[in-house]
Image: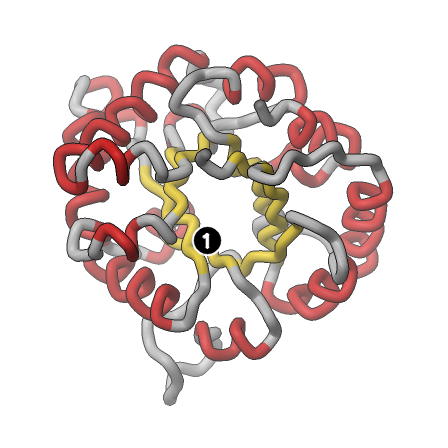
């Protein structure tokens, strides 16, 4: 059975005291997680050690980094390596988020390097893909997302791919006032799974967790997660509010 994941992306928000209070508030709530359901908190680099301590002993709850560099070590001032993450016990990393692609010009090829080194150090990538508004309006979103998959993931073996979680972000539906319907989410998730099946076979494709990352809220989580190819969400703003994110966790199918 595919993993179902509620992933929180704090982005560049919260002081450490606010982060501690948020984690305490969410963890204190009763979560009826099934064995295949996970909660992942992607927190800023300075809070990784604190967050790891907060979740110690919690079943199916993990901490993720929001990024990493493509090299093991070296003269890369300001960057964070997967070896550093591994030394903190971090098991997850978000790669290729639309904000990294847009603001920091991260290419598909560069992300392939990051995927490789994360897997080398047994850190599970949440690989983000998705199209901007201009691509959606042109009707070429399927081709756009397929190219992201091809250039960043298709060099992997089937066994390696099974360790990758994919997060689809319709960039046009994030902070724009536009919203993607649950049907639009399902349509792209089904396309991604079909493309993976072409390359790796249906059995492998059916094992890959695909998250939705387009303004998931408590009000729409259950409907979106109820779609057959949607396996949870990568949640931004709503993950910073205790009751909102708890409701999103409870929306996992």
Depth order, front residue of 87/236 = 87
Residue 250: % across, % down: 69, 26
> Residue 244 at x, y = what percent?
72, 28
Residue 241 in view here: yes
Question: Quarter-wise, where is residue 203 in the image?
Answer: top left
Q: Is residue 245 left or right of residue 236?
A: right
Residue at horizontal 36%, vertical 38%?
207
In this orientation, does residue 98 appear?
no
Residue drawn at point x = 37 percent, y = 18 percent: 186
Placement of the N terminus among the 4 image quadrants = top left
To which quarter of the image does residue 6 belong?
A: top right
Q: What element carries label 1?
A: strand
Residue 45's place in the image compared with 166, above or below, is below
Q: Mark 1 points at which residue?
A: 94
Which is more toward the observer, 224 or 100? 224
Q: Position of residue 72 (x, y in %)?
A: 37, 80
Instruction: Tell me if residue 215 comes above or below residue 126 in the rendering.
Output: above
- The residue lying at 53 percent from left, 27 percent from top is 215
Q: Quadrant of the C terminus?
A: top right
**How busy is the neighbourhood of tag 1: few (under 14 within 10 Å), some, or many (20 plus)?**
many
- Determine the image quadrant of residue 69: bottom left
Left or right of residue 218, residue 168 in this image: left
Point out residue 178 in the picture as x, y percentages from the top left corner.
45, 17
| Image-based side of 33 in relation to 132, left or right | right
């Amino acid at each position: 059975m595919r993993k179902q994941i509620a992933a929180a992306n704090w982005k560049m928000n919260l002081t450490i005291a606010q982060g501690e209070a948020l984690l305490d508030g969410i963890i204190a709530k009763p979560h009826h997680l099934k064995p295949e359901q996970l909660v992942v908190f992607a927190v800023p680099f300075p809070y990784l050690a604190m967050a790891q301590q907060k979740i110690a002993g919690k079943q199916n709850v993990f901490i993720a980094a929001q990024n990493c560099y493509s090299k093991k070590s070296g003269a890369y001032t300001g960057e964070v390596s997967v070896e550093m993450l591994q030394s903190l016990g971090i098991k997850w990393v978000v790669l290729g988020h639309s904000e990294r692609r847009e603001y920091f010009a991260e290419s598909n090829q560069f992300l392939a390097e990051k995927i490789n080194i994360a897997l080398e150090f047994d850190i599970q990538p949440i690989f983000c893909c998705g199209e901007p508004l201009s691509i959606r309006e042109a009707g070429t979103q399927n081709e756009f997302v397929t190219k992201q998959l091809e250039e960043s993931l298709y060099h992997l073996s089937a066994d390696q791919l099974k360790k990758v979680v994919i997060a689809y972000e319709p960039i046009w539906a994030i902070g724009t006032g536009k919203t993607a319907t649950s049907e639009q989410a399902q349509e792209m998730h089904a396309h991604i799974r079909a493309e993976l099946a072409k390359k790796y076979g249906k059995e492998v494709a059916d094992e890959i967790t695909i998250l939705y990352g387009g303004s998931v809220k408590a009000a729409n989580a259950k409907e979106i997660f109820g779609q057959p190819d949607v396996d949870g969400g990568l949640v931004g703003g709503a993950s910073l509010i205790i009751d909102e994110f708890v409701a999103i966790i409870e929306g996992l199918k």
